[in-house]
């Protein structure tokens, strides 16, 4: 696995942890945190899913590199969740971690049918296309995500990687700088600084 492929794989885990925190328990309305905040976990209000513990379990399984078990959890969630977009996005992230980009794209696209502004799905599709070296498609989906929410750092991370891969140094640097502005303490800062120095 190349350095870039490894960084993209790590990104999937971070992206999934951010996604998981948006799918929490309806019981209390308090803020919760899943996973290590340095790896992308964020605070959110509880109240978006009755099945928070199962999403949390899936995130933990992914953190333990038990991707097939996490896929089983998401598949089960598809049968019990009224709002299936989150489970589909989670499946997309799991398939991406397994380098099964065909199924990842299917899951992410199904999620977008239900929730057309799903940042997890838009960024996930961009990352899947980036991994497949379909850079024009990757740029398209990252830019869609950026239009919906220009404050999501992962979008700029993906764009910086893609532009760096295709040799567009100006755009790579611009997006790397924006990523650092939005996520100055990110574990990816060093990679973005390397892109800026090129």
Image (cartoon, rainbow, N blue to C red):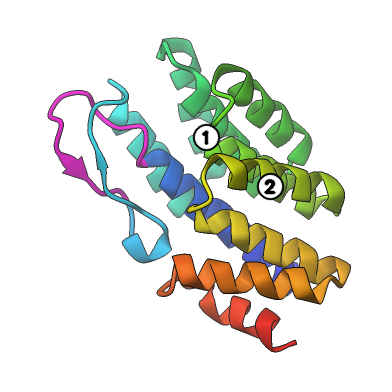
* Residue 143 circle label: 2
Residue indicated by mark 1: 90
**Which range is magenta?**
21-34
Q: Quadrant of residue 81?
A: top left
**Closer to us: mark 2 or mark 1?**
2
| Main secondary structure found in the magenta portion | loop
Q: Quadrant of residue 19?
A: top left
* Sequence-first tag of 2 and 1: 1
Q: Can residue 109 be found in the magenta stretch?
A: no
Q: Quadrant of the N terminus?
A: bottom right
Q: What kind of element bears circle 1?
A: helix
Answer left or right for 174 relative to 181.
right
Q: In x, y percent, where is residue 119?
A: 54, 39
Q: In which quarter of the image is the C terminus?
A: bottom right
Question: Where 6 sits versus 116, above or below?
Answer: below
Q: Which of 82 and 171 is in front in this view?
A: 171
Q: In x, y percent, where is residue 8?
A: 65, 60
Residue drawn at x 44%, y 53% as measured from the top left: 63
CA neighbours of label 2 inside 10 A, class few (<14), some (14 to 19), many (20+): many
Question: Where 69 sits versus 196, above or below?
Answer: above
Q: Which of 150 and 2 is in front in this view?
A: 150
Answer left or right for 169 relative to 110.
right
Q: What is the tally of numbered marks visible in this picture?
A: 2
Q: In x, y percent, where is residue 175?
A: 64, 67
């Amino acid at each position: 696995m190349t350095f870039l492929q490894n960084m993209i794989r790590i990104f999937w885990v971070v992206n999934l942890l951010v996604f998981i925190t948006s799918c929490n328990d309806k019981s209390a309305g308090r803020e919760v945190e899943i996973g290590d905040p340095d790896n992308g976990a964020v605070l959110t209000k509880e109240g978006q899913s009755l099945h928070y513990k199962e999403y949390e379990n899936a995130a933990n399984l992914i953190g333990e590199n038990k991707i097939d078990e996490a896929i089983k959890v998401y598949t089960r969630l598809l049968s019990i969740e009224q709002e299936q977009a989150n489970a589909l996005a989670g499946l997309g992230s799991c398939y991406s971690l397994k380098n099964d980009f065909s199924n990842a794209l299917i899951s992410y696209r199904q999620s977008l049918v239900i929730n057309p502004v799903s940042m997890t799905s838009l960024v996930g599709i961009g990352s899947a296309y980036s991994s497949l070296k379909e850079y024009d498609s990757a740029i398209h989906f990252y830019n869609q995500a950026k239009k919906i929410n220009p404050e999501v750092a992962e979008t700029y991370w993906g764009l910086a990687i893609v532009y760096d891969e295709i040799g567009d140094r100006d755009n790579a640097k611009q997006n790397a700088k924006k990523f650092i502005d939005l996520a100055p303490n990110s574990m990816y800062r060093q990679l973005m600084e390397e892109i800026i120095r090129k």
